[in-house]
Image (cartoon, helix red, strand yellow):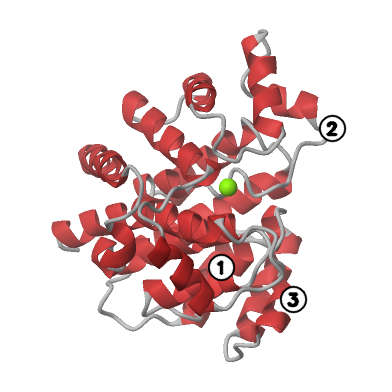
Amino acid sequence: MDKEVLKSKFLGSLVGTGVGDALGARFEGWHMVEPRAIEAVAEGQEVLAYTDDTHMMIGTAESLVRNEGFDGEHMARTFMQNYNREPWRGYGPGPPRIFRLIKAGEAWDKAAERLYHGGSYGNGSAMRIAPVGILYHDDSAKLREVAYNSSQITHSHELGKEGAALQAYAIALAVHLEPSAVLDPKEFLARLGEFIHHEVYKQKLAKIEMLLNKTDRAKVVAELGNGIEAFNSVPTAVYSFLSHSRSFEEAVLFAVSLGGDTDTIGAMTGAISGAYLGVNSIPDKWRTKLENRLYIEELADKLYESGVQK
Ligand SMILES: [Mg+2]
């Protein structure tokens, strides 16, 4: 693949996370939203401000860049420092409690376990996984390992980790595809199915395939979900992408229009779509207004450079 195309995909995935997150932020918890309303709100904003999803995606990228790979202790500390600087980003109750445990001496890979018995299966580790998906797009074993381990910091339930790995692998597959080539959704789903072992996700992938030729939003929400659980949101993001694979704008507007956990489903859809179509597919009207866009692009550049050197 052409180097500039590949680089554009790295940028697209991280900027896509931010744009999807920011577009969804105003509609969290809504039942459903008309795409026109989402556009109107974005138009009225001077800056598209992101939430904890993108803030933690930035922390993930910062730590991967600094260590030229995964270091659990460092990533946990980076999340903690970023949270302490900007605690108003819409974090749930889990992360600050986990950070307090780590600060008090708990190991980075044990704190989440201690807080939630059996671990959390929320989508909080999948929402921030784009840097892992792009950096390890060529190495699915490493991608899985780092997705699981980075999830362990906050979401240690196997369904939480598997959700993060599924989202990362969807991004990796999207990076691999030539943006100009026709995407075969069934082939894409088959690849995801080979990668994913957990039955809960296998069933969701089958439902995605069944829904591909329908656009009934209520049916999509009923079958795939729009909640905060990883298995009720990662497949929804994959569906939003696959059912609108030629357009970043349409994919993300559809994802947010489903309501529920709109910022996270928007962020995850934007991460996959941006990884497929590249950063230039993100409409200027949104991309140029994204808060901290230059810094997010700088992190994507650095991940690209370290990925090329590997
Ligand atoms: Mg959020």
The amino acid type, in three-letter code, at marker 3 is Glu
| 105 relative to 71, above or below | above
| 160 relative to 28, above or below | above
- The part of the image, by quadrant, that contains residue 262 is bottom right
- Mark 3–mark 1 Cα distance, whole angstroms, equals 16 Å
Find disc 1 in the rendering and name its residue.
256
Q: SS class of the residue under badge 3?
A: helix
Q: SS class of the residue under badge 1?
A: helix
Find disc 2 in the rendering and name its residue.
117
Q: Residue at the location (51% across, 68% down)? A: 191
Q: SS class of the residue under badge 2?
A: loop
The amino acid type, in three-letter code, at marker 2 is His
Confirm or deny contact between disc 1 and disc 2 (CB under 8 A). no
- Horizontally, residue 199 falls left or right of residue 39, namely right
The mark found on residue 223 in the picture is 3
- Horizontally, residue 30 falls left or right of residue 184, namely right
Query: Residue extending furthest front?
Result: 44
Ligand 1 within 8 Å of the CB at mark 1 = no
| Residue 137 in picture, x, y percent from top left | 37, 52
The amino acid type, in three-letter code, at marker 1 is Val
Between 3 and 90, the residue placed more toward the observer is: 90
Between 121 and 57, the residue placed more toward the observer is: 57
- Mark 3–mark 2 Cα distance, whole angstroms, equals 28 Å
Count of marks, rendered view: 3
Is residue 186 visible in this depiction of the protein? yes
The mark found on residue 60 in the picture is none
| 208 relative to 70, above or below | below
| 149 relative to 132, above or below | above
Q: Residues within 10 Å of mark 2 (few under 14, many from 20)?
A: few
